[in-house]
Image (spheres, rainbow, N blue to C red):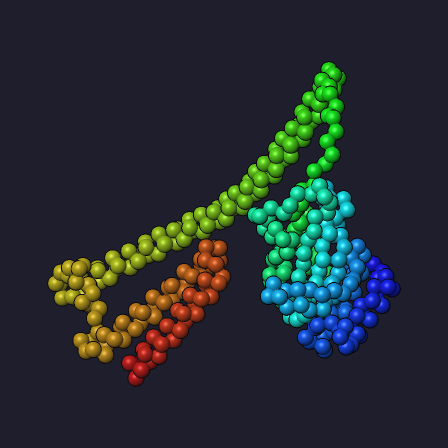
Amino acid sequence: MALAFSSFRFVDAALSTTGPLALSYAHVNLKWLIRDHLLALLADFPSLSPSIAAFTHDNGTTVHLLNASGRLPLRSSTARGIPLTIWLHQDYPHFPPLVYLSPPSPTASTIPHNHPFVDPSGAVASPYVISWRYPKSNLSDLVRNLANLLALSPPFVVEPPRSPSPPKRLPSKREAIDRLVAILHRDMASMKAKAEGDIEAALGMQARLCARARELSIVERALVRERGGLKGRAAVMEEAKDVLVNWLRVNHRGVAIDESELDEVFEGGGDRNSMLVVDCEAEELAIEDVLYEMEQGLNGGVVPLEKYMKEVRGLAREQFFVKAKLMKLKR
């Protein structure tokens, strides 16, 4: 919004004044920043106008300061807004401005003692003022924040003029029917919207359950295939075991061998090196079996690819060391 030329000239003249009438700002080099902040405030809130006056602090010190005063418009019953004055402290902008409110009319009540932002004297202590930080804070944002706070929690209550209330009239039959139809229409629309939401949620749950059922079906088929493969391998091993037992009974000089002592027959030549060779070869074959089963599980969709890669990497490393050890033992 355009700024009045008179306000522009007044602020420049006030900040340029020297001698006894000079303003009391401690930071001379920040006068142009004070000028920019004040002009921006006057442009954003044309109901405020600048002036200079003496201000007396609580400790009795009197200083010569700039201020902006006028009515702050609110979205409330106070049509003309609340009168306020914003004093720019002598240490501005490192110190927050001093804001005071005045009653908007003689019929307005006093400020309550429990108001969260304004004390009974009219001094404002809003969160924006308390948390003032330069250069993040400025006058325009302060007044916008104050307008929002006072609209939610008005500091003054204006008594409206009392007028005789019109006599109450009973609604006609047609009006009562129209109201009832409107209520029923609103309730039906609400119930329809809720039912549509429930249907969408149920359809989403159905889709998730169908996807889960497909996944479980794939896992089930993979487990059935694995079970059949294990049964076949068990039958082959059982047959091989019978062949070995029969061979031992024939070729062990006619001496009967207890099946619980078969492990002793396959021990090495009795020395430690031979036993280690047998253990390494058995371990290598076991790793080969695990790698085969992992591959089958991956192909069947039972084992995820990430888990398969991780396990195969570990088994391959273990197999490498076993083969190295076996080669060393055989040498």
Q: Residue at x 26, y 72 (%)?
A: 278
- Where residue 326 sits, quadrant-wise, is bottom left
- Where residue 77 sits, quadrant-wise, is top right
Residue 90 locus on image (x, y percent): 68, 70
In the visual, does 274 lie left or right of 321?
left
Q: How many marks?
A: 0
Quadrant including the C terminus: bottom left
Residue 248 locus on image (x, y percent): 19, 63
- Please identify the residue farthest to the bottom as the structure is shown: 331
Q: Residue at x 70, y 63 (%)?
A: 87
- Please identify the residue farthest to the top as the structure is shown: 173
Residue 329 shows in the view: yes
Residue 241 locus on image (x, y percent): 26, 59
Residue 231 locus on image (x, y percent): 35, 52
- Please identify the residue farthest to the right as the structure is shown: 5
In the visual, does 288 lie left or right of 280?
right
Q: Residue at x 41, y 60 (%)?
A: 293
Q: Is residue 98 above or below residue 159?
A: below
Q: Residue at x 35, y 79 (%)?
A: 324
Residue 138 shows in the view: no
In the visual, does 322 lie left or right of 43?
left
Front-most of 222 and 35? 35
